[in-house]
Amino acid sequence: MEEMFVQELVVVLIAGLIGAFIALRMKQTIHIGYLLGGVLLTLPFLSGLVDFDISRNLAQLGVALVLFTTGVEFPISKILSIRKSIIVGAFLHAVLFIFGATILLKLFNLSTFQALFLSAAFSNSATVLVLKIIEEVKFDIKVTDTIISWLVLQDIAMVLVAVFINSYSSGEGLQLSNIFGAALKSGLFIGISLLLGRSVVPKIFESASKTSASELLLILAFVFCLTVAFFAEMIGLSYTLGAFLAGVMISESFVNHEIFSEVKPIRDVFSALFYVTLGTLISLSFLLSDFVTIVLILFILILWKFITGFVITTLLEKQTRTGFLVSMSLVQGGEFAFILAQIGLNNDWIDRDFYSMVIIVNVISLFVTPLLIRKSEKWYMSIREFVRRKHMRLYRLLFVKLDRIVDVDQPDLINHVVICGFGRVGTYVGRALDKTNIDFVVVDSSAETVDYCKQRGIRIVFGDASNIDVLEKADVERAQAIVIALPEEGATEIIASNARDLNPNIKVLARSHMPEEDGRLKSKGVTITVEPEFEAAISISKKILNFYGRRDLNIGSYLKKSRRRQRSKISNGDNNVNSLGIAKK
């Protein structure tokens, strides 16, 4: 038994590594590589190597730990600040998607229960994968928080969906008392968790951190995560919801960052196990035998999920860009599908062939997810520009009226500065301009930022800065300069290009994070790029040299020359240089 356990883990992890290296070579996310590794293990000459029973049980820890670490960095104040619009939107989306998808799937000769079951299984999104990808893509805070809030609320909604499916399968129909009981149970569990997270739990972990045994904190966090997850499942809720709330309860403690850094490596190993074992669930023979039908079903589900998500999010958030990015990020199936499929098979609700279809449709949706999320910003910009050129009336409806472009306390300005994005960078720039009595106007798509600016008498235009109509409201035609303080490179390029179209003489300042970005930004009209990391490096280097009494060395000049050499090599097509401009070995 011990040898089988070790053999299984070795085989699964090696397959995951092979798949990961293939995915990285293909410029795909590493989690797609893990899925690919699992698919490789289903090939005929490898299929009997291990049975995966142990790995699949351990893999559930990966899901729990991912949700746990997300909760650790998701403080209670953020939970309590989730807007009613997001709560209404998430639950309304689940209902509309399941209802509409059930009708659409009937076109494929599925029974009503099969169509309902597949729709319910696909209504949840892949929390683990989406969280990892948006961490890489770096959407703005509003979009990221909306996505995370939806994912959390989906886990709660899935408890109600599971109750409904169970009632329907037993012939009881829609039992509102059961659904109300599940909702009440979820609400009580969340409420008690938040109460404990405000008082008891942080004190326990802070006390543990004061002991001389540093590993005690890690063990305590691990046990706490699994205990809360187990308790949630025991009372009929999702163990993923329990794991997330376990992290949230710790988030108010000053040791939350230490716990995150300690748990993260363990999480990544078990997360790899999870995705490899998901890949092994694909039946290649079933996929090839009914490939066209599976692809069509997947296309219908993704399209309908996107449409319902986009309409609901856009109407509630009053921003087409937020609606597009959020809905595009959540179009895939999720972990709930595999749990529901296994429950359905064990209880004879579905047969083995339909089980294979549910699994394959959801797993393939995971393969396309990285592409959809990474390209979503670019596709949104392209669609909006296409509509602007081809159908101005539709453009005005979607991207002006629906986007609720609002001109707040905006008198006519001239030779002013336009600040796109009023986060930390934009706020500091605004303070500097205010101190020197230089007029400026802010462009931001956050309602909270509008309230902040109105309270302080700051001129602001509410809307998406990449929308040329929004820039017109900010009087870019008469501005002296525009500062693009947004993290997304794609949005920065569009804003710079639109600003140049409105005012060819305007000075465009933007931040970049990689030397490779400079050329693209300059080609789009950016006048000056600022690398925050580089400026921080100069400041830190100067302070270190001051400690050693080396004020005579102009380190800033040296580093700037080094950066120019690096940019020159990159522009000449030489990618064999590191961040210091030194040739790689």
Image: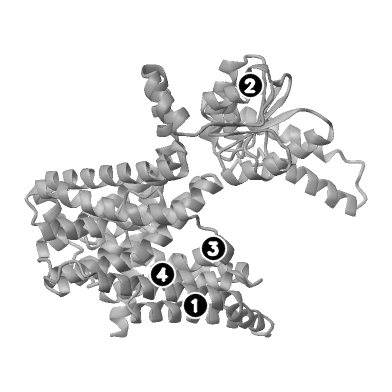
To which quarter of the image does residue 514 belong?
top right
Query: Which of the marked residues, 1 or 3, is nearer the chain's N terminus?
Result: 3
Residue at position x 15%, y 52% from top? Answer: 287
Distance (Cα) linking label 4 and label 1: 13 Å
Q: Which residue has dot 4 on it? A: 241
Which kind of residue does numbered mark 3 sit on? Leu
Q: Which residue has dot 1 on it? A: 192
Q: Which residue has dot 2 on it? A: 476
Query: Would residue 264 be found to the left or right of residue 393 on screen?
Result: right
To which quarter of the image does residue 204 belong?
bottom right
Which kind of residue does numbered mark 1 sit on? Ile
- Percent across and percent down for residue 524 are 56, 23
Q: Which residue has dot 3 on it? A: 80
Distance (Cα) linking label 3 and label 2: 38 Å
Above or below 372: residue 493: above
Distance (Cα) linking label 4 and label 2: 47 Å
Query: Image quadrant for the N terminus?
Result: bottom left
Query: Which of the marked residues, 4 or 1, is nearer the chain's N terminus?
Result: 1
- Percent across and percent down for residue 103 are 15, 49
Q: Nearer the viewer, residue 434 or 6?
A: 434
Which kind of residue does numbered mark 2 sit on? Val
